[in-house]
Amino acid sequence: MHPLDVPMVISGTFGELRSNHFHSGLDMKTNGEEGLKVYASASGRVSRIKVSHGGYGKALYIVHPNGYTTVYAHLQKFAPEIEAFVKERQYAKESYEIELFPKSGALEVGKGDVIAYSGNTGGSSGPHLHFEIRDSRSRPMNPMGFGIEVKDTKKPIVNGIWAYSLDKSAHINGSQKPYRLQLTPEEGGAFKAESIIASGNIGFGISTIDKQDLAPNHNGIYEVSTEINGQENLKLEMNRFSFSETRYINRLIDYTYFKKYRSRISKLFVEKNNPLTVFKKKINNGLIKVEDSLSYNYKIYVKDFKNNTTVIDVPIQGRFIDSITRSEIFETSDFVKANENYTYNSGIVDLLIPKGSLYEDTYLDLSVSGEIAEIHNNETPLHKNITLVFDVSRYKDEDKKKLYIGRINGNDKVYYSRTSKKEHRFSTRTRTFGKYSLFTDSTKPTIVPINVSSKKWISSAAHLKIKINDSESGIKSYRGTINGKFILMEYDYKTGMLVYDFNDKVNPDSENNFKLVVLDNVGNRATFETTFFRKP
């Protein structure tokens, strides 16, 4: 059954292209509200509960007799029995963030039972329910294949088609640069692409979205298949994948184009180091070998789950051209082979790139000026973490305490990169190329009380609210107490709000001494203390 009792409106589809991953479920709209009842879609037992500041926020996992697991994420709170189970353990651990694996029989649920209430916790950008179905091997599956009905009579929308030259002698209209084709709409919603002249191994890419009937959201498509002269040569289908492969999305898309223009092109050909299982057919890996003087008709079919289909015809004329505009390769002294480890040392900075971090052999642009290390550019994807090490032996021990490694973005904004400190060597592991340097953070976090002040009565308030922030290295931890006893404060990093629920009844006295200690990522400490009154 559906986990919500409101009309099924989707803001995110299964397999949708997201940053560094495929979307692993359905995002179900909740009318812009929080607190809607969330129901168990089938009988089972709660096998896992995770509460975190980011990611899925408050998430519940139910395993069912057939071995499948359903996941309910970004929840506001759990149903009373589950909420009590979680809070008892949060207080025992004295931590808001927690991961639990209840024993069999501890938390049984029946189909249709209220298990939680919808919310906006974790990395959610607005109130909704994220819902997943995973198989017995924890691989996400498309919930639409299990009877989740979404009204959809609209054909997928095609934003653009690109052609790519894929060997040294190949060309598209005399050039090896990616070429965007002009599309002409035809009757019935199909498109005719301009005819191209080509030779050698070529491939195509597509930018496409799908819209359902009840929402304007730009959602992902379900299937793309291609034909060359009536023979199918590639099929990509969003039915199931594994979390271990999801980062290979950066091999599927034209990553450089995405970083430049914030738009994703799915390549309809399979390159080396692309093991994605969402490809259900790949004759010649989706490449088209174009020979001189021959004509080809390439077709692309884009489908949503309801079989609404958009078709694109691409005429190709084979013609060998001796003199073509070749792609420029920026050669440097730092050539990295994808299947080998690579190290770089400048004296102040060391860099280790493990084999398998890059998808293909690459010339890297590496330079160090003072304490600024420019590690290539963010238009090249990394599959694994690389390690960047700074020598800090020239700093005094007292100054080292406030140092951290930060990444500088294009607008010169600095982002804290988790920094490991060992004597004279500070290191960070990252999957983002770019500009890195050492920074000093000597500023304490800020603490702003929202609804509490010294010697005031707050008997009518349901919650105690405090806002915290750290504009440099960022918040690392916080701890609140009332009359010396730990209180559970829920932290929303998106708003910086800390909230304590007075229903937890940690404060039994009329006069209550509240203390909050906040640490940032280099250890700067801020403390707030006040006394408030409340009817016991």
Image (cartoon, rainbow, N blue to C red):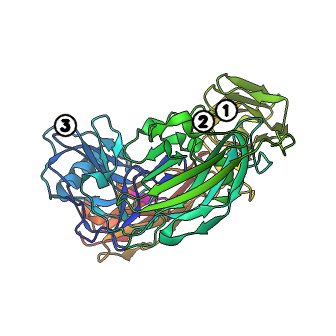
532 or 161: nearer the viewer: 161
**Residue farthest to the front, as pictured:** 293
Residue type, mark 3 in image: Lys
Q: Quadrant of the C terminus?
A: bottom left
Residue identified by numbered label 3: 103
Which three-letter amino acid code belongs to the residue tagged 1? Glu
How packed mark 1 is, by other alpha carbons closer than 10 Å (few <14, some 14-19, many 20 or more), is some
Disc 1 designates what residue?
Answer: 360
- Rendered location of residue 275, percent (x, y): 51, 33
At mark 1, the secondary structure is loop
Q: Real-space Cα distance between discs 1 and 3?
A: 45 Å
Q: Residues within 10 Å of mark 3 (few under 14, many from 20)?
A: few
Q: Which image quadrant for residue 47?
A: top left
13 over 176 or under it: above or below = below
Q: Is residue 448 above or below residue 163?
A: below
Q: Is residue 346 visible?
A: no
Which mark, residue 271? 2
Is residue 103 among the parts visible in the rendering? yes
Question: Which image quadrant is residue 505 in?
Answer: bottom left
Q: Are marks 2 and 1 in contact (CB under 8 Å)?
A: yes
The image shows residue 131 at horizontal and vertical percentages of 32, 55
Per the image, label 2 sits on a secondary structure element best described as: loop
| Mark closest to the chain's N terminus, 1 or 3 | 3
Query: For the view shown, which residue lies furthest in the top direction?
Result: 340
The answer to which of marks 2 and 1 sits earlier in the sequence is 2
Residue contact at pointers 1 and 3, CB within 8 angstroms = no
Side of 300 where 316 appears, left or right: right
